[in-house]
Image: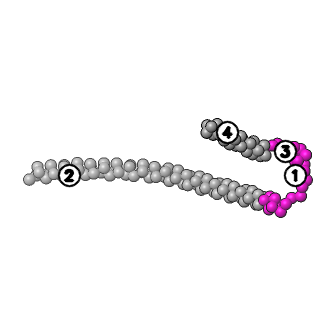
Amino acid sequence: MKRSIALIIAGGLTSLIAIVLLIVLFAGGLPVTEAEAVQASASPATPESIQIDTWQAEVEAANRQIETTLQEREQAWQSRLAEQQAILTQLDQSSQAQMAQLAAQLQAIQAQIEQTDTNLGTLQAHSGVQQ
């Protein structure tokens, strides 16, 4: 007897849940007919809907302004980046020319040192011979 009562209660609960789900699905999922759509569009706008429309328009305008500002900033950063790259290229070219000039001067100084070293060796050899 207890088992049959449990089965009846389980069946009743399952039926109740199924009925609630069907009501929720049909209440929210029914397609709108053309007559209902015309009636909804013909009904006067409520203050809440006007406020929502105004708010949406303000949000869209703010979004457009933000997009414009971001695009302007991006263009400014890109132009600054291009300028900085041009300056770096110019500095690189001028520094390479200066490095080549300094390398040539260093080689000339090294040749002078070697010549001076040779001259000192010769002077030492002559001074040793004379003594």
Label 3 CA crowd tier, 10 Å (few <14, some 14–19, many 20+) = few
Depth-wise, is mark 1 or mark 2 nearer the camera?
1
Left or right of 4, for residue 39: right
Residue 6 highlighted magenta (yes or no): no
Of callouts 1 and 2, the N-terminal one: 1
Q: Name the kind of residue labelled 2 in the image.
A: Leu
4 and 3 marks in contact (CB < 8 Å): no
Which badge, 4 or 2, is on the more N-terminal residue?
Answer: 4
The dominant secondary structure in magenta is helix
The kind of residue on which mark 4 rests is: Ile
Mark 2 crowdedness (10 Å alpha carbons): few <14, some 14-19, many ≥20: few
Residue at 26% x, 48% y is: 114
Stretch of the chain drawn in magenta: 30-53
C-alpha span from label 4 to label 1: 45 Å
Please provide percent x and percent y for residue 73: 64, 57
| Snapshot quadrant of residue 71 | bottom right
Please identify, in this view, whether the residue under mark 4 or under mark 2 is nearer the observer: 4
Q: Residue at x 91, y 46 (%)?
A: 35
Give, as a three-letter code, the residue at label 1. Ala
Return the mark for residue 32: 3
Marks 1/2: CA–CA distance? 111 Å
Nearer the N terminus, badge 3 or badge 2?
3
Discs 1, 3 touching: Cβ within 8 Å: yes
Does any portion of residue 29 appear in the rendered image?
no
Which is more N-terminal, label 3 or label 4? 4
In front of the other: 52 or 110: 52
How many residues crowd mark 1 within 10 Å: few (<14), some (14–19), many (20+)? few
Residue at the location (63% across, 54% down)?
Answer: 74
Q: In the shown orientation, is residue 34 left or right of residue 11?
A: right
Give the secondary structure at mark 1.
helix
Q: Residue pushed farthest front?
A: 1
